[in-house]
Image (cartoon, helix red, strand yellow):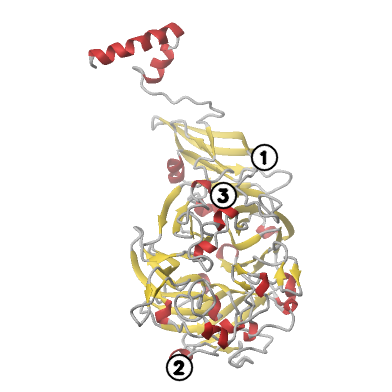
Amino acid sequence: MSVKYHRALKPFVISALALGIASTAFAIGGPSGAQVRYPHSGQIGAVLLNPYEIAPLTAVIRNGGYQLKNVSVRVVGKDGGPDIAYKVSDTQCRTHGGIPIFGLYPDYKTEVHVSYTRIANGESKEVKDEVYKIYASPANIPMTGYAGEEATFPKATVKKMDPKFKDRLYLVNNMLATPANGGRVVWNNPEGGALEWSYPPQNAIYDSKGDLRWYMDPRSIYDQRNPLNAGIMMGFRQDKDGAFVWGYGQHYVKYDLLGRKIFNRTLPAGYNDFSHATKPMPNGHMLLRVASSDYVFPDGKTHVRTVRDVIIEVDENGNVVDEWRLFDILDPNRSVVLKALDQGAVCLNIDASQAGHTLSDKDLKAQNHFGDIVGTGPGRNWAHVNSVDYDPTDDSIIISSRHQSAVIKIGRDHQVKWIMGAPAGWSEKYADKVLKPVHKDGSPAQCDDRSCNDPKFDWTWTQHTGWRIPSKSDKRFFYLSVFDNGDGRGMEQPALPSMKYSRAVIYKIDQEKGTVEQIWDYGKERGNGWYSPVTSITEYKTDKDSVFVYSATAGGTFNMKSGAFESAPNPYINEFKWGDKEPSVEIQFHGAMGYQAMPVDLKEAFGH
């Protein structure tokens, strides 16, 4: 140390001694080295609430310098609500520096039981059982100021809950109205890209009693004022390591249940506007539904951004190892479905003034601009792909194209393997790929090229989530779950808006014979009250041999004259035992704009 610097410190040292704090200063950073100082509430370390500043109803009980083994947790339910119990792997304890706690109640001191083996100096082992009381603040996320919003999170009413499903935790991926600050940042206004869909996230997990047990505070990763950090959070999937992948706008991300970031990446430069769908693959890669940042027309002069019509495969490092350019693989000029769509509800481009209106050939031919508009050809919303899945038996992808009302399987060679949708409008190149509808005995279903009049079969219309059921499928037989939204059913609009309905459907596809059989459906009997014009999900769950359904935009106040929602929807979660025609679970949310939902697996999340 220089004499000059030493003399500069001297007055400070004298002042410190005069104040009697020298012993504290040297104890913290003196000969004994740095010490960890925080209050302990148990027999290991302190309780760290919201450890990653994204999941306020989580915590970590710090390990206090000990090694922890054989950890188990039980978060006690309040007022007769379900306990949340799980075991924690050694890996998770090391990763989080202690015991991860999930499922606290907001504005409540939650009782948490933990059991563990505490190891000191690598030798001394003690088995401990402790009870903690952990308070979490009231649930709070940024709201939009929209006049229709009445609560931070929607209330859930449990109408039916079979005991088999009482341990369920449901992640609900909803959204709020576009706020003023988000509406000011829109690409290519008014058509825009995915950022036109800049609805703030409202992501939460509810238990089987309908109580909130987790929610996301997005402020550290999401900014409505920044076009690169906004968009709609969509495509939540739980990966095999228990963490969640999803995307929003120009990002695709992966975080664990406590909010620890695994990665948060911008899309590769040649692509834009993530929305709707991610799919983790067995090899560790991911499939993402994006669009092309620069498509050149055959004239070599016209360049456009495309709309929801590209699938990319990215590896662990974010490299794009393959792409499926659907405008090159399919027919972007097929218009029969486009002309039947209700222009008041083109997925999330909801415009009440256009409710019940459809497009004509003249309307399509008159289009002279590009953007997020229903129309033919690249640069317009001709495909609107809203899900992607993967079949490892033949290395193929499966897409759901809302604006073609078709679920389509495409190989690694970028060739169409089959089309599950009405035959009308497909050119000669694709006609022999359309599956033939049959009954269980092999007899043909009563369908023409545009519609079906058969009580045991219908195609899907403007559907979402065309997903393979892995545990029931093999190389020949492909079991497919779909949410059939039902707009444009039979390639027409009904006489009255109240005649519309949605369905959850399971199909069995014989890939050798090129046939499709409808083996289960639900929803027509619920009528218009269960109808979801947009969004939603049907998914098979192996753990309970069940079918999970979220009719995500059902139950709003519907104006019969305009055919549009006058208030936020009141969507339904249903879960069915395999083959049952009546649900074992029904939960209704009040005043929520839903996208999708899913059961959460805590065994995967915490390593057991």
Which label is found at residue 428? 2
Quadrant in the rendering for residue 574: bottom right
Q: Position of residue 128 (x, y in %)?
A: 54, 33
Q: Is residue 443 above or below residue 269?
A: below
Residue at mark 1? 107
Quadrant in the rendering for residue 575: bottom right
Which label is found at residue 380? none
Q: Looking at the image, is mark 2 or mark 3 earlier in the sequence?
A: 3
> Amino acid under label 2?
Glu
Please name the residue shown 38% across and 63% down the image.
285
Q: Looking at the image, is mark 2 or mark 1 earlier in the sequence?
A: 1
> Amino acid under label 1?
Asp
Nearer to me, 599 or 502: 502
Nearer to me, 257 or 269: 269
The answer to whether residue 457 of the structure is visible from this angle is no
The answer to whether residue 352 of the structure is visible from this angle is yes
Nearer to me, 556 or 563: 563
| Contact, mark 3 vs mark 1 (Cβ under 8 Å) | no
State the quadrant of the N terminus: top left
| Contact, mark 2 vs mark 3 (Cβ under 8 Å) | no
Which label is found at residue 216? 3
194 on left or right of 282? right
Label 3 – label 1 distance at C-alpha: 16 Å
Q: Is residue 1 above or below residue 222?
A: above
Q: Position of residue 63 (x, y in %)?
A: 47, 34
> Amino acid under label 3?
Met
Q: Position of residue 343 (x, y in %)?
A: 62, 76
View extreme (top): residue: 18
Nearer to me, 587 or 566: 566
Label 2 – label 3 distance at C-alpha: 49 Å
Q: Residues within 10 Å of mark 3 (few under 14, many from 20)?
A: many
